[in-house]
Image (cartoon, rainbow, N blue to C red):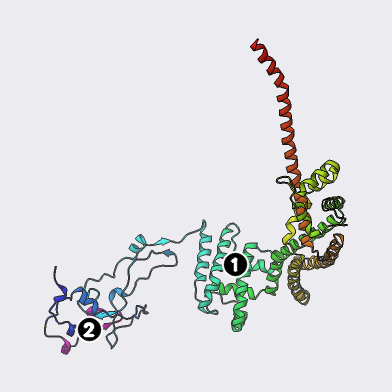
Amino acid sequence: MPNYYSSSVNWTTSVNSCQPLKKRNLLENLQIEPDKVSPTPAPAPPPFQDFLTVLNTKKRTHTSLNVNGITSDSNVYLLHQTPSPLLDHTNYKYPKIRARPIYNFKYNETNIWTQSSLNSTKFDVNILNKFFAKETKQNNSNEQHTKNSSMTTTITRPFQILDKSSQLNYDVTMRHLLQLLAKNNGQNATIDDVLHGIDTGNIDNEWLQCVQRLNKTLNKHFEKRPDHKIKFETYNIENFNNINLIELFFIKLLHIPNYNFKLNCYQYRDELQLQLNLLSQSIDNLIHNIELILNNKYLPGIFQLLCYLYNIISNKCVPGLDFISLIDALNSPINQLNKTVAHVLVEILNEYYSNYLINIINDETLIELKKFISIKYEKFYIEIREIYQQYQQLEYEYINIKNQYELPLFISSMFFETKKQFDKLFQQEILIKTGEQNLANYFCSNDLTIDICLSTIGQFVDKLRLAYIENMKEKTQKISIINNERKHSIFLPINKTSSFLSCV
């Protein structure tokens, strides 16, 4: 193996005489001044390690192609440096060639990239298309393919109003909207259909969500750049040929009368109205449960029986028990293993007041009250008031524009029905506060809140139900044991007689 490090050739002269290579050069037209030609023949190529040391180690950055002729400073192009003819990257997809390029190096005629060779840049481009090109995905019809191709081409055009950095904020959502439109092949849906739906209110819910995201981002952008909003509003609506699809969508959107108001109304209808309906349903259930407890005719008797047991066991004469301590009272252990006061109370009720017991433990509504431990009606009304503020803002805008512009029909009915709903909710707030005070008076507990009251009643009834199940299970086991003993006592004399006869 040759020793590349022991080369005796002096490369200093060849390095110093190197000309910097920057751009393309036709080698056959390259002229060298006679006084600069070395009288000695050109040396052999340097070893690979030495060649690497003469490479220019400037930062690798792409340089724009310059197809002008040879410049005075001897910056040149190479034949193979310019990609000609250009390929159709719009309609075809080409795989990448996995190579790492060298962007700058010192010119040397003996270099593999610069020495004269056959002209390798002339061939039929169809060969590349044969082996590399792959057509972009087409839809079933040529018409749909043409429409989608124009959309893709338009969305990739450079921005004319927004800056380039803004593209990332809108590109993903816009592409998702185009995918949703592509699903509606039979309807041939376009961006204009989305804009028409915004204007009339007849818009697909998935489309609307994309538009609302785009509009929210656009409004934030306008807050930072008010001049861009002016450009969108004053843009010539007839000059749409070379504009980016995202900008085209925003220009048409801003030309829809009261588009922001309409989008806010659609959002209120699809999101806030649904949330308000759920809150209203929870408020109705809360009021119903308050009335259920106050009017239940079995709870007073059971509570009084529990207080009676307490007085007997404690040898006291108290008129009632603290409401918060009722669960602890049921959980109090007795002298029997795995038994509590709840088992005793259920035993007495089942023996003497079975009607009370059966009606209480079979009431699923009372048992479900134990889930109210984490429900605060104050939080309900905080959310309701937040929605009400947005409703007031929309209503104020509606009053100012309803006589000047034609709006979707559902908007007027939505405001009318929502006003009635808010009036009902605020009246129910008064009923809830009154009901909370009534529950505190009913159970003789001044600091009793609705959530504590309802959850305590639910836990109380559920513990009675579980105690009843355990008592009945134990009773069934005892009956089964007694029956087995009776059967054993009947068969025992017969067995003794037969054994006596066998002995005789």
Mark 2 closeness class: few <14, some 14–19, many ≥20 residues within 10 Å:
few
Residue 18, numbered label: 2
In this figure, which residue is indicated by the disc labeled 1?
191
Residue 356, numbered label: none
Left or right of residue 78: residue 492? right
Q: Is residue 139 above or below residue 13?
A: above
Let me know if residue 85 appears in the view. Answer: yes
Residue 263 lies, in percent from the top left, at 68, 70
Q: Residue at the spot x=16%, y=90% of the render?
A: 35
Numbered disc in front, either 1 or 2 = 2
Q: Is residue 464 above or below residue 132?
A: above
Span colored in magenta: 16-38
Q: Residue at the spot x=72%, y=25% of the render?
A: 487
User: Does dot 2 land on a helix, a strand or a loop?
Assistant: loop
In the rendered structure, which amino acid carries the disc numbered 1?
Ile
Q: Specify whether residue 18 is painted magenta.
A: yes
Using the image as rendered, state which of residue 141 and residue 453 is in the foreground: 453
In the rendered structure, which amino acid carries the disc numbered 2?
Cys
Q: Quadrant of the C terminus?
A: top right
User: Does dot 1 land on a helix, a strand or a loop?
Assistant: helix
Residue 390 lies, in percent from the top left, at 73, 72
Residue 108: quarter of image: bottom left
Residue 164 lies, in percent from the top left, at 50, 78
Residue 52 lies, in percent from the top left, at 24, 76
